[in-house]
Image (tube, rainbow, N blue to C red):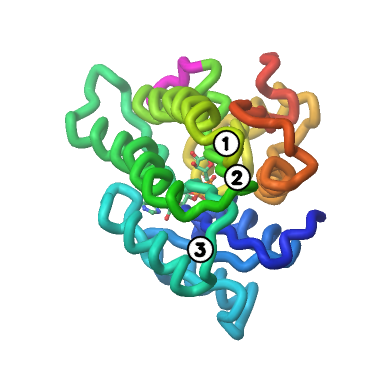
């Protein structure tokens, strides 16, 4: 655990597995947390379960694909807590479609949430983030290996996130550090469909012989935000239980 007392986290996709676990982890470390998700019911319920008083944890509906929502979210965070130290844009979609039959709309929807959404939010947040702040993006093992069948659009956004994050590291250093985390198979709603019928095969190919837990990504994100990572920027750190090495 890290000491994040008096610090503020803004996390998107916070109604989901990794975003929700990240909110919980930072809350347990003493941070105040602004949680955002397009699924308002889910994110409000999670926020209330962490902090029924709504003093330390707030939730807001937010559509990552909308630039105006990014602006509104950063303003809401500053209104609620007066500062913004840690930014974790985790919202994303993971649709199945072969490239040969992918429509423009399918391609564009994934770009809009997974890539444009990260740009919109980071651009808004930078001006509000003091020296010593940290941005942690969510890339993916697929952003490094590529080649995920039926996920050409998703993998393309995650490869782009690694590159984008490294640009942030150069442009924002030394005041703000920026790193990506690249999960393998983490047990969240996002991968339930992809795992159907091949869960055992994935586990067999994973040296740690299980799927990852969302908290195991959250703890890496917290480490990267903490002073323990004070000389780490521009990295994309894999958290895959060894799956990345291949079978
Ligand atoms: N679970 C994994 O194995 C895995 C692997 C690699 C990368 N990741 C990445 O980690 C991040 C979190 O994934 P997760 O596994 O927690 O997924 P999840 O599906 O549990 O959560 C994603 C959340 O994003 C929200 N969301 C979707 N579209 C949105 C939009 N337009 N605006 C705002 N919110 C929106 C969803 O409502 C959901 O709550 C994602 O960026 C994902 O690509 C996950």
Asked if the residues shown at circle 1 and circle 2 are in contact, with their CB atoms under 8 angstroms apart, the answer is: yes
* Residue drawn where x is 53% and y is 38% of the image: 138
- Seen in the picture, residue 52 relative to 166 is either above or below; the reply is below
- Between the residue at mark 3 and the residue at mark 2, the CA separation in whole angstroms equals 17 Å
Q: Which residue is mark 3?
A: 35
Q: Percent from the top left, x then y, of residue 132?
A: 64, 47
Residue ranking furthest to the bottom: 53
Specify whether residue 42 is in view: no
Looking at marks 1 and 2 on the same chain, the residue that comes earlier in the sequence is marked by: 2
The stretch drawn in magenta includes residue 148: yes
63 or 79, nearer to the observer: 79
Residue 103 in picture, x, y percent from top left: 19, 29
Principal secondary structure, stretch drawn in magenta: loop
* Mark 1 / mark 3, whichever is N-terminal: 3
Pointer 1: what residue? 178
Q: Residue at label 2?
A: 134
**Mark 2 Cα shell of 10 Å, populated few (<14), some (14-19), many (≥20):** many
Marks 1 and 3 sit apart, C-alpha to C-alpha, by 20 Å
Q: Position of residue 181 (x, y in %)?
A: 61, 34
Span colored in magenta = 146-150
Q: From the image, which quarter does the N terminus lie in?
A: bottom right
Q: Is residue 175 visible?
A: yes
Classify 133 as above or below 41. above
- Foreground of the two, 159 or 87: 87
Which part of the image, by quadrant, shows the C terminus? top right
Q: Residue at x 53, y 71 (%)?
A: 81
Mark 2 or mark 3, which is nearer the start of the sequence? 3
Dot 2 beta carbon under 8 Å from ligand 1? no
Q: Quadrant of residue 85?
A: bottom right
Q: Are marks 1 and 3 in contact (CB under 8 Å)?
A: no
Which SS class for mark 1?
strand
């Amino acid at each position: 655990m890290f000491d994040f007392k008096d610090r503020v986290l803004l996390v998107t996709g916070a109604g989901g597995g990794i975003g929700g676990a990240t909110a919980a982890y930072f809350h347990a470390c003493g941070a105040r947390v602004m949680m955002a998700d397009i699924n308002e019911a889910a994110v409000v319920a999670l926020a209330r379960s962490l902090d029924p008083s709504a003093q330390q944890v707030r939730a807001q509906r937010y559509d990552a694909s909308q630039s105006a929502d990014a602006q509104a979210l950063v303003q809401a965070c500053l209104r609620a807590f007066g500062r913004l130290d840690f930014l974790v844009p985790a919202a994303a979609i993971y649709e199945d479609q072969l490239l040969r039959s992918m429509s423009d709309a399918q391609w564009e929807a994934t770009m809009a949430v997974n890539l444009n959404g990260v740009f919109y939010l980071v651009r808004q947040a930078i001006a509000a983030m003091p020296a010593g702040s940290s941005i942690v993006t969510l890339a993916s093992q697929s952003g490094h290996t590529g080649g995920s069948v039926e996920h050409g659009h998703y993998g393309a956004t995650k490869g782009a996130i690694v590159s984008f994050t490294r640009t942030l590291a150069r442009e924002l250093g030394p005041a703000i550090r920026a790193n990506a985390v690249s999960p393998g198979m983490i047990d969240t709603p996002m991968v339930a469909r992809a795992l159907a019928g091949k869960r055992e095969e994935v586990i067999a190919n994973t040296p740690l012989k299980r799927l990852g837990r969302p908290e195991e990504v959250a703890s890496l994100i917290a480490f990267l935000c903490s002073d323990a990572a004070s000389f780490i920027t521009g990295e994309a750190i894999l958290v895959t239980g060894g799956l990345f090495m291949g079978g």
